[in-house]
Amino acid sequence: MGITHADFFRIIPRALGGKAYKKTSAKVTLNDGDKRLEITLGPERTRKIALMEIPACDVRLEFSGYTDAEREAALDLFDLMFQKGGG
């Protein structure tokens, strides 16, 4: 993702629909009954494209106990909250 850890942690509450979660320096864990979502952030780096420098880090989402529909809904919300617009 084109994001810093600070920006990720600023946005993640909305991306999780306001549900309570646990946070460490590079991980978010959401336990919701039998469902569990772990989001792990890789190291921050800079992606260079011509003269532009864009912050980036790998983001891994691991779902357990979710139905396919629940997983898709969670991913749709996650994607929507992390969209960046420009103009």
Image (cartoon, helix red, strand yellow):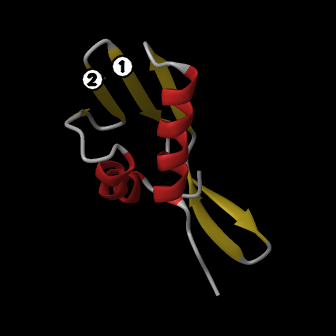
Q: Which mark is residue 36?
A: 1
Q: Is residue 21 left or right of residue 6?
A: left
Q: Is residue 50 left or right of residue 33?
A: right
Element class at badge 1: strand
Q: Is residue 36 left or right of residue 67?
A: left
Residue in the picture at 57% in, 40% down: 58
Extreme residue in the right direction: 50
x, y percent for residue 36: 36, 19
Q: Is residue 3 left or right of residue 24?
A: right
Amino acid marked by disc 1? Arg
Residue in the picture at 48% in, 21% down: 63
Above or below, 87 relative to 27: below
x, y percent for residue 17: 32, 46
Residue in the picture at 33% in, 33% down: 28
Q: Where, quadrant-wise, is the C terminus in this rendering?
A: bottom right
Compute the Cα span from label 1 to label 2. 6 Å
Contact between labelled residues 2 and 1, with CB atoms less than 8 Å apart: yes
Mark 2 — residue?
Answer: 32
